[in-house]
Image (cartoon, rainbow, N blue to C red):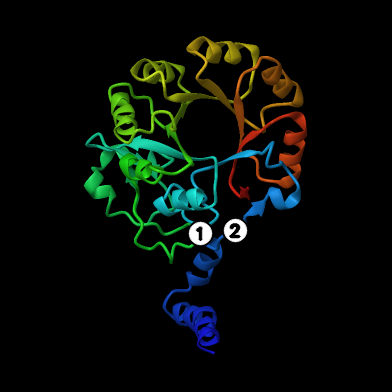
Amino acid sequence: MLSLLNKFITLILVPIYFCVLSPTYPILVLLNQPKQLISLSENGIGTAEDPVYLTAHRGVHALAPENSLPSFEEAVKNGYYSAECDIQLTKDNKWVVIHNAEVDGRFCQYGKIKDHTLEELKTFSYCRGANIWKYKDSRIPTLEEYLDVFVGTDTRPQIEIGIENYDMLHTIVEEINERNLDSQAIVLTYNLKQLKAIHELDPDIELWYLVETMTPEVIAEAKALGDNVWLSASYDKNTEENIKLAISENINFSLFTVNSLEEAKALYNMGVRYIETDILCN
């Protein structure tokens, strides 16, 4: 009886209350509803012996705000192969986890990341994202906080460097090594020069070369860096011919972003085993 009363208060009385105080409240509720995760295993895609390895794109942001600590914790909880994040540098040269160089509409505040110190950014709060009411106290994570989520887990941290910077790359490697995650972490970027720099700092860290289309040229560039280099390629920009080329060249690769069962099944049948997703789960 108490549970029904709580639901009535939450679903009926609270929205009515906020509608009086704020006409935008119903819109915010609709924008921030969590999405239903779609299970590959329940739909017959992949097997225990030959699975699909899923990367949670910006964390499981179907359940929590993207690039937030709860979104990465959900990736671990739900058994994802890896959880991708994006990092930017603050005014005081601290790596923070956020996709854009500017604070976007997911937050209640605005501004460029490089114009704010870490202390200032830690005052910024989410105003958009799945279940933000549940995670109202969440703030922009640091790289250190992000990496801590994966210590002692099977889920791999996957760090996309979002800016062209070389002076602070060593700090990424240092934070990874400090947590003994060098054989677990993945670093990826569109910038081949940055990949080379990371490789020189620690050849044990797996690198993913972000590309639009898998061509003979980019495959050769990735192979030239060493055996520990993958391709991370756009699903929309690659045809079956491109995919077969990569498979024939024995280059490891993952495709982003795949969000339907039909796409996942077609890729699986082509031999693709690593995909990045917003809503698919194991």
Secondary structure beneath dot 1 equals loop
Specify few, some or many for label 2: CA neighbours under 10 Å numbering under 14, 14-19, or 20 or more.
Answer: some
| In the foreground, 48 or 93 | 48
Q: Position of residue 131 (x, y in %)?
A: 48, 62
Residue that lies at the very extreme toward the front in this rendered image: 49
Q: Which is more toward the observer, 76 or 32?
A: 76
In this picture, is 57 found above or below 106?
Answer: above
Mark 1 neighbour density, 10 Å: few (under 14) some (14–19) many (20 or more): many
> Where does the image place residue 161, in percent across and percent down from the top left?
41, 30
Quarter of the image that includes the N terminus: bottom right
Residue type, numbered disc 2:
Lys
Residue 269 seen in this snapshot:
yes
Please state the horizontal and vertical placement of residue 169, each as a whole percent of the image.
Answer: 32, 25
Question: Does any portion of residue 97 appear in the rendered image?
Answer: no
Helix, strand or loop at mark 2: loop
Residue type at mark 1: give it.
Ala
- Residue 277's place in the image compared with 7, above or below, is above
Q: Residue at x 35, y 49 (%)?
A: 140
Q: Nearer the viewer, residue 233 or 79?
A: 79
The answer to whether 274 is drawn above or below residue 277 in the figure is above
The picture quadrant where one finds residue 148 is top left
Marks 1 and 2, how far apart at CA: 8 Å
Q: Residue furthest bottom?
A: 1
Dots 1, 2 in contact, CB < 8 A: yes
Where residue 200 sits in the image (x, y, percent)?
36, 15
- Residue picked out by circle 2: 35
Which of the two labelled residues, at mark 1 and mark 2, occupies the earlier sequence position?
2
* Residue holding disc 1: 130
Left or right of 4: which side holds 214? right
